[in-house]
């Protein structure tokens, strides 16, 4: 938890320092006159929705809301749910949960009145997810030659992790934008009330120390 | 117009990069590379000097099983034993330097799915450990969590 906080703070400091180096641009009278609020965007991450369509035992959806501040800063909240069921001859694993990610994007592109909604950005996220999971497994192979079923009752776990994001979003039609991003997820941790752990964390997926994540999104610019 | 072409250029390159990343990741053969053995580690300790004790010989067999785990193994200071997955008590017949005794461990069994490729393993939480027999020794549970970690020690037998 502490490491994630340090990472996210470091990212914010980097972004702020980059912005400070662009202080000359702010002296531009046109930019000074630009209102802080430049619009709000609501988006849908397409990847989990598509996967939910063709994998019957998996359902996930993710939406995002972000705000353009001077076309440079984009505070963003991403949230969603994820349900997963794995059924094999050896085990049954069920999990359901939800997640939320908080962060900010910084747009590298120069401010523009021609294409104000196109952005190429770097960002950081602090993610938190809650999941309830249960597992029933058949014991077949063992030194003790035992047979039977052992179950883990529904167990709740809270997980956190950090993400560094690099992405692009461009206007396809007026107010409709397509975007994609590459994310480096790192430092996942979870509540350690039990000996075991959730195999899959909502949105993060299989519990690994770090991993690459991808998003493909469609976004609508709200008319206010 | 320059910004539009720049965005298109960046977008195209990013799409190509992501497609390549997906193709390469799809080509990776998915196999289990995780250590899957869950064994309770028991170390012999010389109680007077608090140093590792090396036994001249040791034989270990599970109570109720015909299979010998350690068959008159020489110069050994630690042993790794499988616990039962369904029952909550596991006992071993141990002969240490020709002195027989029974080690009994009571434990909880906690199933864990490692991944789709690796399947499940059974973790254990040790609740108690006792020895019964002619041996003069004290048993000490050092680590109650038995997971899929190699060479981890959980119980000390102080001789």
Image (spheres, rainbow, N blue to C red):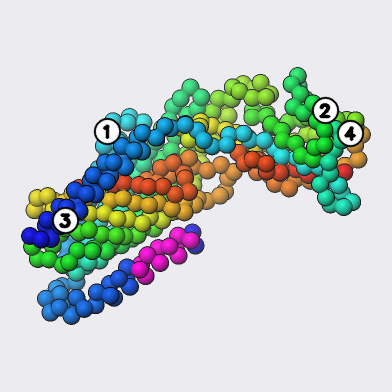
Q: Nearer the viewer, residue A214 or A34?
A: A214
Q: Is residue A39 visible to the viewer in this orientation of the structure?
A: yes
Q: Secondary structure at mark 4?
A: loop
Residue closer to the observer: A77 or B17:
B17
- The answer as to whether the residues below labels 2 and 3 share one chain is yes
| Magenta stretch holds residue A8 | yes
Q: Please, what secondary structure does the residue beneath circle 1 have? A: helix
Q: Which residue is mark 1?
A: A53
Compared across the picture, whether A197 is left or right of B84 comes to left
Residue A35: give its label. none
Please state the extent of the stretch shown in magenta in the rendering: A3-14
Residue in the picture at 26% in, 41% down: B19
Query: CA–CA distance between discs 2 and 1?
Result: 59 Å
Q: Using residue A90 as the reference point, say whether residue B54 is left or right of it.
A: right
Q: Secondary structure at mark 2?
A: strand
Magenta segment, principal secondary structure? helix
Residue A23 coordinates in the image, percent (x, y): 24, 77
Image spot of residue A162 (x, y percent): 41, 56
Q: Which mark is residue B72?
A: 2
Q: Does the magenta portion include B21?
A: no
Tell whether label 3 touches label 4 (CB within 8 Å): no
């Amino acid at each position: 938890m502490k490491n994630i906080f340090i990472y996210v703070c470091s990212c914010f400091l980097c972004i702020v320092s980059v912005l400070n180096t662009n202080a000359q641009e702010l002296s531009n009278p046109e930019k000074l006159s630009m209102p802080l609020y430049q619009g709000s965007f609501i988006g849908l991450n397409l990847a989990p929705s598509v996967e939910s369509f063709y994998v019957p035992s998996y359902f996930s959806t993710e939406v995002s809301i972000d705000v353009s501040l001077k076309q440079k800063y984009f505070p963003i909240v991403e949230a969603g749910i994820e349900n997963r069921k794995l059924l094999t001859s050896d085990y049954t694993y069920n999990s359901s949960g939800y997640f939320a990610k908080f962060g900010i994007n910084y747009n590298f592109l120069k401010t523009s009145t021609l294409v104000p909604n196109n952005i190429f950005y770097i960002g950081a996220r602090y993610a938190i997810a809650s999941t309830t999971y249960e597992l029933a497994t058949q014991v077949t192979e063992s030194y003790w030659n035992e047979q039977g079923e052992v179950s883990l009752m529904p167990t709740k776990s809270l997980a956190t992790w950090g993400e560094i994001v690099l992405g692009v979003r461009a206007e396809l039609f007026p107010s409709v934008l397509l975007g994609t991003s590459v994310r480096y997820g790192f430092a996942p941790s979870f509540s350690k009330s039990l000996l075991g752990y959730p195999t899959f964390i909502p949105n993060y997926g299989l519990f690994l120390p770090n991993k690459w994540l991808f998003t493909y999104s469609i976004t609508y610019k709200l008319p206010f | 117009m320059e910004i539009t072409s720049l965005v298109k250029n960046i977008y195209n390159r990013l799409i190509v990069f992501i497609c390549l990343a997906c193709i390469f990741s799809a080509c990776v053969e998915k196999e289990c590379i995780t250590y899957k053995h869950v064994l309770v580690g028991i170390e012999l300790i010389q109680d007077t000097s608090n140093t590792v004790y090396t036994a001249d010989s040791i034989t270990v067999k599970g109570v109720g099983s015909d299979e010998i785990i350690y068959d008159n193994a020489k110069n050994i200071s630690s042993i790794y034993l499988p616990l039962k997955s369904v029952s909550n008590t596991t006992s071993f017949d141990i002969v240490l330097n020709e002195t027989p005794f029974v080690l009994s461990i009571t434990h909880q069994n906690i199933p864990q799915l490692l991944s789709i490729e690796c399947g499940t393993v059974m973790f254990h939480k040790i609740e108690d450990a006792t020895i019964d027999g002619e041996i003069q020794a004290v048993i000490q549970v050092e680590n109650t969590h038995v997971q899929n970690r190699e060479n981890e020690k959980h119980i000390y037998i102080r001789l």
